[in-house]
Image (cartoon, rainbow, N blue to C red):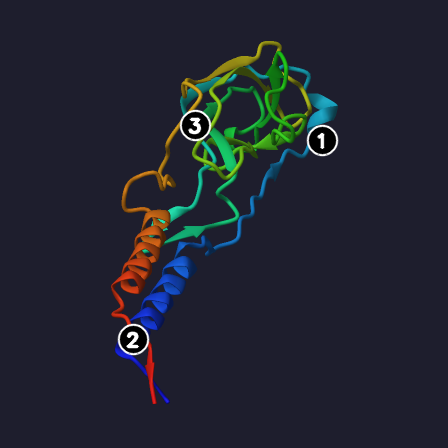
Amino acid sequence: MMMGSGSRRIVSSAAVLGFAVMFATPRVVEACSFGFNEHKLDEAEKAVDTTLPAKPTVGAVSISRGHGPTRSGCGAAASSCDDIGSISFTLSAADDRTPAAMMGYRIAVSGAKPFDGLYPVGMDVRLFDGTMWVRWLDGATDDQDSLDFDLEVRAIDLAGNVSAEAAIVKVRQDNGGCSMGRGSTQSGDGPGVIAFGVAALVGAVRRRRPAGRGRST
């Protein structure tokens, strides 16, 4: 027995549909990990230094939110970092004995903590190249809530002296309840639309198949 040409077209279209669905599935392309600079005290400094460091000075603040899979050709790519939200800002603080590179900082949230696991709240850490990073699990989605809270940042010298005043970092981001970011697949050429189009093609081929040409012997 041999299959008719109409049957061959259907098999071919179904294969294309499977191909499109395969590439519509997000692919994880990298792992996500973060380090931190723990602020360690100096025993010798603790014995002689009683002067508090100055109030920290905060520079430009940048906010990055979690996002959904990014489009890659006919499919989508994802990573284990896609659900990470972050706030970064430059910091500096003057002290009579502790060098700037060895200064530590302590962060607290003013008011109710907006996220579980806001890192490094509650820890004493040093900067990465003059920059502080605050991270949290934000969700791997392009629909993110707005942000409206403050961070209080105090400086800590090598003796463990903590600045009397805290610098305030105002974290504000108004998403209006919905933020479509770089991972959005809402436009008309997204993977879901491709899969739907190929499925419609299969149905059209089936409807056009002439009667009596299904099989011959």
Q: Residue at x 52, y 53 (%)?
A: 31
Q: Residue at x 45, y 54 (%)?
A: 25
Q: Can residue 73 be seen here?
A: no
Q: Type of residue at label 1?
A: Ala
Kind of element beneath mark 1: helix
Q: Dividing the image into 4 quarters, which one contains the N terminus?
A: bottom left
Q: Dividing the image into 4 quarters, which one contains the C terminus?
A: bottom left
- Other residues around mark 1 within 10 Å, as few (<14) / some (14–19) / many (≥20): few
Disc 3 versus disc 1: nearer the observer: 3
- Residue that mark 3 sits on: 63
Q: Type of residue at label 2?
A: Gly
Q: Can residue 41 be seen here?
A: yes
Disc assigned to residue 212:
2
Location of residue 2 in the rendering, given as x and y in whole percent from the top left corner: 34, 87
Q: Residue at x 69, y 31 (%)?
A: 41
Q: Type of residue at label 3?
A: Ile
Disc assigned to residue 44:
1
Q: Residue at x 45, y 26 (%)?
A: 89
Q: CA distance from mark 1 to mark 2?
A: 96 Å
